[in-house]
Amino acid sequence: MSERNFLEDVNKRANLAFSNEMEMLTFVLTDGQLYGLNVFKIIEILECPKSITRIPHSNPAIKGTIDFRGHAINLLDLSQAMGLTPIDHVNKVSYVLVCEYSTSIQGFLVSEPDRLIQKSWSDIIRPDGALYGNSYLTAITYDNDRTVQILDVEKVLGDIIGIEDQVDEALTQRAQKLHLSDYQVLAVDDSNAARQLMASAFTQMGLRHTIFDSADKALAALEESVRTGPCPYDIIFSDIEMPTMDGFTFTRQVRQNPKLAHIYLALHSSLSNRSNQDKAKQMGADDFISKFQPNKIAEAILGQIEKLNAGRT
């Protein structure tokens, strides 16, 4: 397939309506292994430009900035970020995956794009074991006899660029007046970096919380909690991209249970474009919050708690 047709195919698929399957681009890094990235995060694929503006004192994995449609974006070497041999973008042809993450645009340098594949979320497996606990992998899947490793890009960005995790003091003071310790939130995200950020935000607000690493575990806990009484959780936050069960399916399952249907549920995702927000509403979510914005999380919680308090008076 020519590069032109390949890019056209990516753009066409990235604009498809959501389904219960994951459409991913596979690509190769310097270790020769296959990695995968959801095409809905990809804006464009470029051959790495020769003109790169260096950033003094930046992480070595950040090669600099490149021009993308008149804007300077970071160029991050995914191989080097994960401790692999850096990509020789000077002497060899390499490519940039221009992606949107949480309302920001980043350029990820890869050795070579491979192909597009479509997988059911049930075929995407979360690896277990201490080996994967602190790795940059969030899931694996298989394409015929090939293993495809799905990256925890949130962790990569957090480690290389940094993620803001502080809630504004005005919001924490507002939380203290509402006695948030009387309420409990359930959250689910397959990314360790995202779970840490949410836990930090909840703790700063004095909110009791339980966080799961998969939607099927979270759903099982919710269903078990209402077998003999009312649900103890007042608020639910869920990621969208997760192995086994995605956030849209999770939301639909929650809304179908009459004992859970009334609970405020927000989808919290790096898939921050308008179509994802619309899909969240269609699936029954009350809100959509882009990662990683702790103040947005806090504001959503405070608004919901204020409504609950008003209903109890």
Image (cartoon, helix red, strand yellow):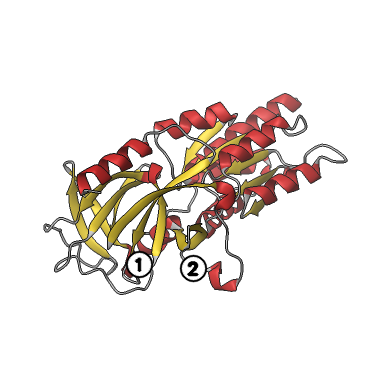
- Vertical placement of residue 291 versus 54, above or below: above
Give how far apart the Cα atoms at labels 2 and 1 are: 11 Å
Amino acid bearing label 2: Ser
- Residue at which label 1 appears: 81
Q: Quadrant of residue 185?
A: top right
Q: Which mark is residue 135?
A: 2
Which quadrant of the figure has residue 270? top left
* Left or right position of 133 against 53: right
Percent x, y of residue 106: 30, 51
Q: Nearer the viewer, residue 53 or 12?
A: 12
Residue found at x 52% / y 68%:
134
Q: Residue at x 34, y 58 (%)?
A: 27
Q: Position of residue 219 (x, y in %)?
A: 70, 45
| Residue 166 located left or right of residue 74 | right
* Res 120 seen here: yes
Q: Secondary structure at mark 1?
A: helix
Residue drawn at x 35%, y 67% as measured from the top left:
81
Type of amino acid at the residue the image marks with label 1: Ala
> In the orientation shown, which residue stands out farthest toward the left?
51
Nearer to us in this view, 47 or 70: 47
SS of the residue under disc 2: loop
Q: Residue at x 62, y 36 (%)?
A: 251
In the image, is 83 to the left or to the right of 149?
left
